[in-house]
Image (tube, helix red, strand yellow):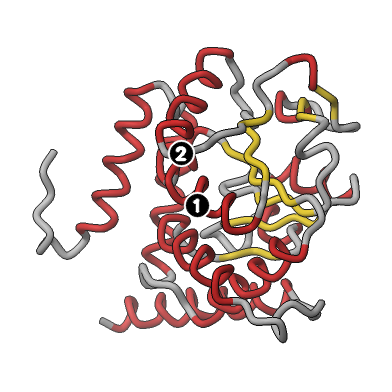
Amino acid sequence: MLIPKTHPRAASLYIREKLVQGFRDGLVVEEGLLAHGRGEMFDYLIGEKTSKTAYKAIKAAARALVMAKLPVISVNGNIAALCPKEIVELSKVTGAKIEVNLFYASEKRKKVITQALKKNGAKEILGITPKFSKRIPKLDSARRIVDKRGIFSADVVLVPLEDGDRTITLKKFGKKVITFDLNPMSRTSQTADITIVDNVIRGMKILIDTCKKLSKEDLVEKKFDNKKNLKKSILIIRKNLRKMANA
């Protein structure tokens, strides 16, 4: 489908097409399409742009990733379909490891996602070799199986488009969790240490750029109030809803 660049929602339609193509290629499952539809709705509610609140979370996330001893980027089908190039670039900029971790896991999907990442320059991809597998305690989904060289040993984990159960469990397991979630009221958003309420395609590019520009003064541990930041995102949604109601 060819989308005119002048279309008022060209960016959203382009992202939708990327997900659909990811589904056709075997990266994305049906449930991933449903999840994206929910996210698209919230993107509309936040105004389809990166807010000052999101920029603040991105700065905190960049600081956490660059200062981490062992940062890991957790990759599922949706993020692999939407941002394979950005995943690889962020990994190079921060020294983070890349690990494939799927809710609906299959060897075929792992292979397709791995190929997509390697096509975009990834050299080492964790989570695909059974001999390195470890289990995160007290988690029932397939995402409990992680790589002992990656998520299992990480101090900071970036989990874009995450499910709430694993976010909670990773926190209990002693990890600092960073996530992208367009719904500031979700369990994932409310549980993570740093929640970036933004479209992952916009936000990942800004996160990479922010990591590159961090100064020595920035690389000092600073307190980030995730709950307070989320409340500001909710206020943005309320404000936009009022505008729509009065239009």
Q: Which mark is residue 136?
A: none
In this picture, residue 6 sits left or right of residue 47: left
Under mark 2, the amino acid is Gly
Give the residue displayed 77% in from the left and 25% down from the top: 145
In this picture, residue 181 sits left or right of residue 177: left
**Nearer to us in this view, 188 or 92:** 92
Q: Which residue is label 1 attached to?
A: 89
Mark closest to the chain's N terminus, 1 or 2 = 1
Give the residue displayed 90% in from the left and 51% down from the top: 174
Q: Which residue is label 2 attached to?
A: 121
Q: Is residue 157 above or below residue 48?
A: above
The part of the image, by quadrant, that contains residue 128 is top right
Q: Given contact means CB atoms under 8 Å apart, are the residues at marks 1 and 2 in contact?
A: yes
**Nearer to us in this view, 246 or 72:** 72
The part of the image, by quadrant, that contains residue 146 is top right
**Nearer to us in this view, 217 or 193:** 217
Task: Where is residue 99? Give x, y as percent.
Answer: 65, 35
* Quarter in which the C terminus is drawn: bottom left
Under mark 1, the amino acid is Glu
Give the residue displayed 41% in from the left and 75% down from the top: 241
* Quarter in which the N terminus is drawn: top left
